[in-house]
Image (tube, rainbow, N blue to C red):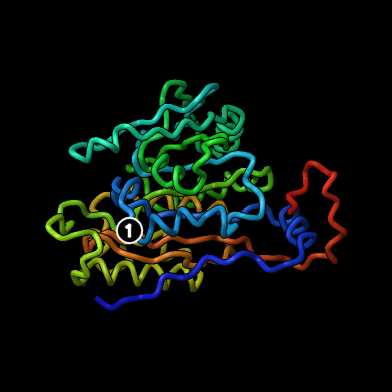
Amino acid sequence: MARNPTPTATQHQQHPSIRCFLSLTMGMDTFYISHGSPTLSIDDSLPARHFLKSWEPAGLAGPQPPRAILIVSGHWETDTPAVNVIKGTNDTIYDFYGFPEQMYKLVYPAPGAPDVAMRTKKLLEDGGFGPVSEDDGRGLDHGAWVPLMLMYPEANIPVCQLSVQTDRDGAYHYDLGRALAPLREEGVLIVGSGSATHNLRRILRTFAPTSGEPVPEWAAEFDAWLREALLNGRHDDVKRYEERAPFAKVAHPQPDHLYPLHVALGAAGPDAKAELIHRSWSNATLSYASYRFTTKQQDTPTAPPCDCATPALVCD
């Protein structure tokens, strides 16, 4: 397998007042995180684990924590959109089997975000994606809590989860993300959580996660195609990946782990710029490629002085 250096996360270098101003005028970036195997929660040999643990120190989502997080996981499938409306603490769902016992003792007690859930429901229904159901008993599945426990380990940011509809297509989920764009200007971090490649029947379980076993052609070619399509702004190709990507049905026999990418991409807008922020592999077939989507900056006036006394500003 050709070794590709993992991009190093870097902070924006703008003056604090400029970061404050951009947060107001452009809203938050959106992200697609490849969470790969549930062992990401405990396996220090995985480069993706160290990448996610660097999330807050590197300021990847901005200099200040988000007000709340809306996470779209490939592990919650419903016929129509659904949000979890949790007024207390989110439960930790162990939706995996046969893994080390210590993984079933991990908890991520993040508070729920019922206000974000209801705002999400309204945006989607106003955008023609209703009916949106409310689930007041469902916590966070491992597609949500595993990456979040590394990204925000203090579990003090309210979290709401949104489901995917696997009987729909990528264009549907992209447009669904478009409807959620106003959340970005309300301090809500939108994260899609899946895997850039996800064929569990072909996973190489006999090798250590980072053994250096060559990545098979189907996984390498799909991963490379997705990267090039995103970085070159070919959103239409990404929306229709099943028709246009090499080995699409092998890399994703089911679309559940790629649709969160479409939601995050759509939420960033039609001219969003994609950035590859991490790339690594485990078990030779699981790509941990992760992306940031930044809304295209329009012509803006000169940034005003930073007014940190104003609650709406996101400042250093």
Residue 269 in view of the camera = no
Q: Is residue 308 left or right of residue 140?
A: right
Type of amino acid at the residue the image marks with label 1: Leu
Q: Position of residue 180 (x, y in %)?
A: 58, 44
Q: Which residue is mark 1?
A: 46
- Tell me the quadrant of the picture where the C terminus can be found: bottom right
Note whether 90 is above or below 246 in the view shown. above
Note whether 201 is above or below 278 in the view shown. above
How many numbered discs? 1
Q: Position of residue 176 (x, y in %)?
A: 50, 45
Q: Is residue 181 left or right of residue 31?
A: right
Identify the residue at horizontal 52%, vertical 55% (top origin): 55
Q: Position of residue 265 (x, y in %)?
A: 51, 56
Q: Is 109 or 25 nearer to us in this picture?
A: 109
Identify the residue at horizontal 47%, vertical 36% (top origin): 161
| Extreme residue toward the left, this view | 206
Q: Position of residue 308 (x, y in %)?
A: 82, 48
Identify the residue at horizontal 25%, vertical 37% (top origin): 96
Give the secondary structure at mark 1. loop
- Tell me the quadrant of the picture where the N terminus can be found: bottom left
Residue 94 in view of the camera = yes
